[in-house]
Amino acid sequence: MKKFIITVSVLLCLFLAFQWYDYRYGLNWRSSDQPAEIIAKTEGRQILIKKPEGYVPFEIRGVDLGVGIPGYFATDYKIDKVTYLRWFDLIQQMGANTIRVYTILGSDFYNAFYEYNQGREEPLYLIHGLWVNDYVQFSHRDAYDDAFLGTFLEDARTLINILHGKQMFSLGYGTGSGSYNHDVSPWVIGYILGVEWEPSTVAFTNQRYPSAAYHGEYFSTKPEANAFEAMLAQVGDTLARYEDQQFHCQKMIAFSNWPTTDPFDYPDLMKKMFEKFTSVDVEHIAVQSAFQVGQFASYHVYPYYPDYLGVMNRYEIGDGMEMTDQRSEQNSYYAYLKQLADYHSMPVIIAEFGVPSSRGQAKKESRGRSQGGLNETEQADALVSCYEDIMASGCAGSIVFSWQDEWFKRTWNTMAHVDLTKTPFWSDVQTNEQFFGLLAFDPGKKRSVSYPDGDLEEWQGMDPVSQTEELRIYAQYDEKYLYLMIEGTDYNPVTDRLSLGLDITPQSGSHRVLGTALNFDQPIDFYLTLRGDQAEIQVQERYEVLNAVYGSLVYGGDPYLDPPAKDSPVFKPIRLFLQEVSAYNLGLSKVWEMPATDPTGILKRGNGNPAASDFNSLTDYCFAEHAVELRLPWELLNFSNPSEMQIHDDYYEKYGIENLSISSIQVGATIKYQGEVAMSEIPLKGWGRNVSYHERLKEAYWRMQQVWAPK
């Protein structure tokens, strides 16, 4: 009996092991001469999709789907199945036919994608990415290091198993996790392998392995290929071979790229200015006959950066080239896209394009398609014109970046201002990277606590935080703004000059404002003036973050050697540092030019209610009868983490930006031109991780729907 039990147990274990291995790795039960299943393929410079009548031309109209929602970092993978299903429906209603994801996600995504496409005559297709960890890219490793290439190859096999529903469980480093048992491969049309490559990693790899090459069954390198391109060929070959041999299925493959590592040669001046010292050229990677579906070229291209051709044209660098677009207008974005499309022998997909509807700005573009500083109407206009440029240039498709805004994002010219460990818990309208989405996340479960729209209903029944013979001040706040409403019986916001002071930090501030005859009874850090369409908030020079972070570049000296006085009465315009090219930093002029900045302290009058016909998403203030409604972004007031009510400490005592917790701020206002101004307290209490938000489709969604799915 004992022997029988042991035998049965061994057989059961073997059976379970066999079942697990088949589930995990997908045993190949099909005949080796059975043709691979192909639902999409390339032909020349176009993409074809399989339909009942055969293969027909297919324009990729895609949306990049991020993984962020308010209250969580991307790597938390907290978007649930219900949300995905709702989003898929909205995306397809917009006229998109494809979504693109960047990395292996949690199982909720694949379960939702499977359920959504069941029985659907016109499915939503998927282009799946394969991510390379940022730390690996920016470390001392080259691309052949096991942490880079080994992980890349292992993730490729894991991804294929997941898409075919054969990954019982996955708990990857930096990727989603779960049990993957739904086969979504019938709707996967291709892969984009990799990320925006760090040029130093590419160059380091090429320098270490000067003779590297790769020759595989599906992908091989040509003689002119460099070592990094050989690594890419190996990854593509491994993925294609694994999917074909295990599942008799082939999908198109692209290798991620962007202008920083594009295949073009530029004048030495441009190379130096933009640190353009290496290239990744997918024309050096050959598709073998076994890989029947072909490859396409994938690029992330935005209209504002790096704009190589625009700079060359403006400063007459190099031989120059034709910049005229399909509208007979000068357009360096179109010219660059056309250069890409003409260069490649394969279809070119612009896998990221877009502009953010943020208040803060990082880079200007000559045609107004800038990196920030655009309201939602301007964002929509820019998105449509970019799409028109992409298709007119000869590209085979495009993917809008991105579906949703993402609160956790950072950007180079504000990341020093905020606590990067707390960014998911508040919405920073000064950080452009958070606002590329077609879908906004606004504070509040159904609506925000206030909108500057001239309707004072949300202020009714509230007690003022300050009350004088002149004015009454009311205050509210949420995850995005500090809201103020100032009213007075004799106050006319069109003709009266309102002067308002804010005391944010106890570490510095001034009772006086140079050039005025006002005296605030508490030292203030910010001074706001408003009359009619003219409004601006300025910062006391000790508390100017631009000087603390970029002072040596903007003002030409080290601010820490001779810091401003704590009680200085000098108030300065609030500005954001911009990434701009000048004749001086190109070396074409010896005359020093002050770097470009954006006057972000200038306030805009408008209607900030999304339900209004004249809605302007960048509205800072709006008038009512004898009143004005204001909303001020937290970061504009030097809050580094409003979710816990933390502000910037003294820059010059801490030698940089450190957090300082506070429980209140002070506010005071007058319409007089001289005299004392009483300050009153606004109590503050953070919300921690308990964020409140609701979804809202931006105008860009509806405008793209008009282009992609006109009715």
Image: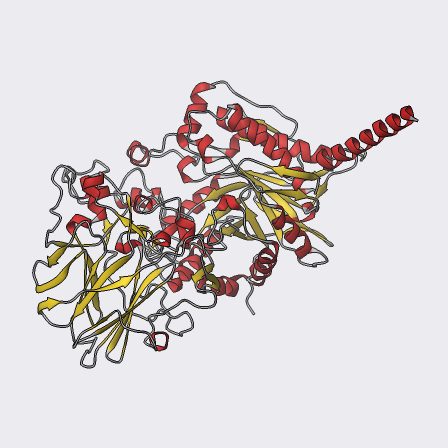
Give the side of residue 256 with respect to residue 186, left or right. Answer: left
For the rendered model, the colour scheme is secondary structure
Give the side of residue 400 with respect to residue 8, left or right. Answer: left
x and y, in percent, of residue 467 in the image: 21, 73
Quadrant (top left/top right/bottom left/bottom right) for the N terminus = top right
> Is 259 placed above or below 434 here?
above
The answer to whether one can see residue 269 in this image is yes
x and y, in percent, of residue 602 in the image: 23, 60
The residue nearer to you, when weighing 67 against 295, is 67
Give the side of residue 106 with respect to residue 413, left or right. Answer: right
The residue nearer to you, when weighing 320 against 216, is 216
> Is 205 placed above or below 353 here?
above
- The residue at 9%/63% (across/down) is 519
Count of residue discs: 0
Quadrant for residue 6, please give it.
top right
Quadrant (top left/top right/bottom left/bottom right) for the C terminus = bottom right
- The residue at 33%/70% (across/down) is 452
> Is 212 placed above or below 125 here?
above
Give the side of residue 613 with respect to residue 525, left or right. Answer: right
The answer to whether one can see residue 287 in this image is no
Query: Which residue extends farthest right?
Result: 1
x and y, in percent, of residue 597 in the image: 23, 50
The residue nearer to you, when weighing 337 against 477, is 477
> Is 689 placed above or below 154 here?
below
Query: Which residue extends farthest front?
Result: 2
The residue nearer to you, when weighing 582 against 617, is 617
x and y, in percent, of residue 538 in the image: 19, 57
- The residue at 23%/56% (across/down) is 504
